[in-house]
Image (spheres, helix red, strand yellow):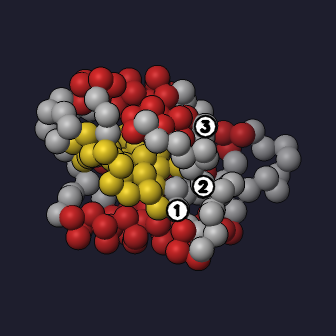
């Protein structure tokens, strides 16, 4: 059994209209939501006895900043994050290729990237309709496989879907 955690980057800023999309940073809400979602994820992983073994992330500024804030709460070393250029605005197919290449001794992997890819990948893997994973949304999936290379051929079980506004009663769609 493998566990896959799909994470959409936190809310980014559109204040600098001249900035390249790749270089957009988090806005105030994103800087607030990322550590909170890290704490919530850490608590759920601890409660279920799951340890985080791998973390792959887009190198876009907003994704890097999200990862830095999330992993502090997860007690995952920043130096162990794999920064994968191909995850920047990646399609589900590209994300699946990254997942399939994970070492089999890695039981739990977090993948932090962008929409629409994160939403589409979650829908492909689970057969469920998410519509739009909100910024800083976290989807935890159980995969009935021994090897990461088997992932595209199985149906994942949705363990949890959390996002910043979930507890406030808002639907959180962004």
Residue 163: mark in rendering? 1
Residue at x 21% of width, y 57% of height: 51
Query: Left or right: 95 with respect to 107?
Result: right
Looking at the picture, tell me which residue is in the foreground, 131 or 17. Answer: 131
Cα–Cα span, label 3 and label 1:
16 Å
Nearer to us: label 2 or label 1 = 1
Name the residue nearer the viewer: 17 or 115: 115
Q: Quadrant of residue 150?
A: top left
Residues under numbered marks 2 and 1 in contact, where contact means CB atoms less than 8 Å apart: yes
Vertical comparison of 11 with 8: above or below:
below
The residue located at (54%, 30%) in the rendering is: 90
Q: Would you say residue 72 is visible in this rendering?
A: no
Q: Looking at the image, can residue 107 be seen?
A: yes
Q: Residues within 10 Å of mark 1 (few under 14, many from 20)?
A: many
Task: Give coordinates of residue 60: x percent, y percent.
Answer: 58, 42
Precedes in sequence: disc 2 or disc 1: 2
Residue at image location 54% in from the left, 68% down from the top: 166
Could you tell me which secondary element the residue under label 3 belongs to?
A: loop
Residue 8 in the image: x percent, y percent? 53, 49
Q: Residue furthest right?
A: 17
User: Which numbered circle lies on residue 135?
Assistant: 2
Q: Quadrant of the N terminus?
A: top left
Residue 143 vs 86, above or below: the answer is below
């Amino acid at each position: 059994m493998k566990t896959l955690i799909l994470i959409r980057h936190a809310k980014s800023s559109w204040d600098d209209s001249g900035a390249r999309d790749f270089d957009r940073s988090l806005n105030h809400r994103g800087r607030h939501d990322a550590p909170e979602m890290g704490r919530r994820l850490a608590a759920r992983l601890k409660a279920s006895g799951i340890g985080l073994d791998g973390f792959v992330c887009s190198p876009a500024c907003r994704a890097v900043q999200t990862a830095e804030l999330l992993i502090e709460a997860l007690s995952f070393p920043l130096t162990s994050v794999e920064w994968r250029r191909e995850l920047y605005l990646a399609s589900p197919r590209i994300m699946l290729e990254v997942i399939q290449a994970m070492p089999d001794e890695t039981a739990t992997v977090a993948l932090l990237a962008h929409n629409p890819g994160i939403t589409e990948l979650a829908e492909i893997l689970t057969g469920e309709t998410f519509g739009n994973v909100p910024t800083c949304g976290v989807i935890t999936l159980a995969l009935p496989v021994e090897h990461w290379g088997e992932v595209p051929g199985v149906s994942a079980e949705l363990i949890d879907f959390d996002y910043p506004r979930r507890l406030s009663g808002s639907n959180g769609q962004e």
